[in-house]
Image (cartoon, rainbow, N blue to C red):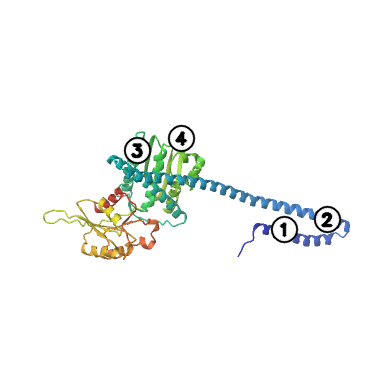
Amino acid sequence: MKTLNFELKITIAYILAGGIWIMFSDKILLSFIHNPNLLSTAQTYKGWFYVIITGLVFYFYLKKHLEKLRKAEQKAKESDLLKSAFLQNLSHEIRTPMNGIIGFTELLNTENLSFEQKKQYAQIIAKSSHQLMNLVNDLLDISLIETGSSPLIERKVHLNNLLDELKCTYESWVTENVSFELVKELTDQQSIIFADEDKLRQVLNNLLNNAFKFTEKGHIRFGYILSENELEFSVEDTGIGIPPELYELIFDRFHKADLDIAKLYEGIGLGLSICRGNVAIMGGRIWVKSELGKGSSFYFTIKYNPIEPLIHPTHLQQNNDQTIQPTIILVVEDDDTSYQLIKEILGDPDLLILHAKNGREAIDIYKKNQNIRLILMDIKMPVMNGIEATRELRKINSNVPIIVQSAFTMNDMTQSKINADFSGYIAKPFSKEQLLALVNEYCN
């Protein structure tokens, strides 16, 4: 049913109130006053009474309504300003790495370049590509979070190992004037938990990126403590700090574009908004303590849900002369370029790489080679996709590690895909270090 607009409601209310007042007030006056002169005077006062009362009622009603409209208008103007500044900043953040990629790609075609120059240009192109990819990921992540399309995907996580990896990654960012520390409260056994590793890693990455971005001297410290039945993570720095009036606003999307510091530091200001969204999905909370000019401390919590580690029997066998059989890895990938990249990264004489171009080939190969230690499974393939192939392989061996390596994000995976019982996940494009860390984890 269509609702009445505001002005129509006011008009109807005024007419009804006036009609009711005239009908009942005239009857009351006629029952008490019989002198025509007095009746005329009383009706005049009655009319003024109605005008004054209705005027006061409508004044306060209209005032309240207009205050809401003015607040909404002010908020809309602020939002438009933030969006405009955000789009300008976004344009800058896209064009900058694109300029590096296009410019140095063209320079690579220049004749008589030395090996060092080619290496330097290639490094710049790779760095710009990663910068652009991170930007695209942020935009996709905030969109998925705000539309409720980012599901919670909990799996076994070696928390201490995850933090050690982050520590190693960010060690290269450390300068002479900044110390970098990691604090872990639980033992390695106690830190094996059930959690959404991708979201947890993303939150920590965003907070650490900000810490290094805004800290020129002092220290950066991150880690966790166990508080009751929650893991409380923290990332502390001695950077530029945040004024108290911005404690809540910094977690809103686009807000960084409204700050002066947006002109000084790269980024589009979605990192903290993504952090808040991911922490909420994991059932936790996030907050900040800061002092302008002295540093900031970001905290967030997730539930502590420990699990016993699963112990898989090793497939490595030694024959009678004690020679070790090569570790066999099956790569299920229909794209030749992607397969060639994986093969080059895993170029180790102790590894035997088998290749299947679709899920059906993968099943056939595994039936003939059930000593395969690890399967890297693509999702979108002809003949049989990775979801169907994984379900069939689980019927043959429920313990063999099957890792998704796909351009699909975990947020794109439906619940039916998640239930296909993958052991892990790595998103394209992935780095050499990411793939090797995953293979080392499952192949020991």
Is the residue 135 above or below the residue 5 in the image?
A: above
Count every numbered label the image shows and give the total.
Answer: 4
Identify which amino acid the numbered label 3 is placed on. Answer: Val
User: Which residue position holds label 1?
Assistant: 14
The residue to which callout 2 is attached is 42
Residue at the disc numbered 3: 174
Amino acid of disc 1: Tyr
* Separation of residues labelled 4 and 2 (CA atoms): 72 Å
Visible in this render: residue 52?
A: yes
Q: Residues within 10 Å of mark 3 (few under 14, many from 20)?
A: some
Residue 392 sits in quarter:
bottom left
- Report the residue that reaches farthest toward the front: 111
Q: Nearer the viewer, mark 2 or mark 3?
A: 3
CB atoms at circles 2 and 1 under 8 Å apart? no
* Tag 3 near tag 1, CB within 8 Å: no
Disc 4 crowd, CA 10 A, few/some/many (<14, 14-19, 20+)? few
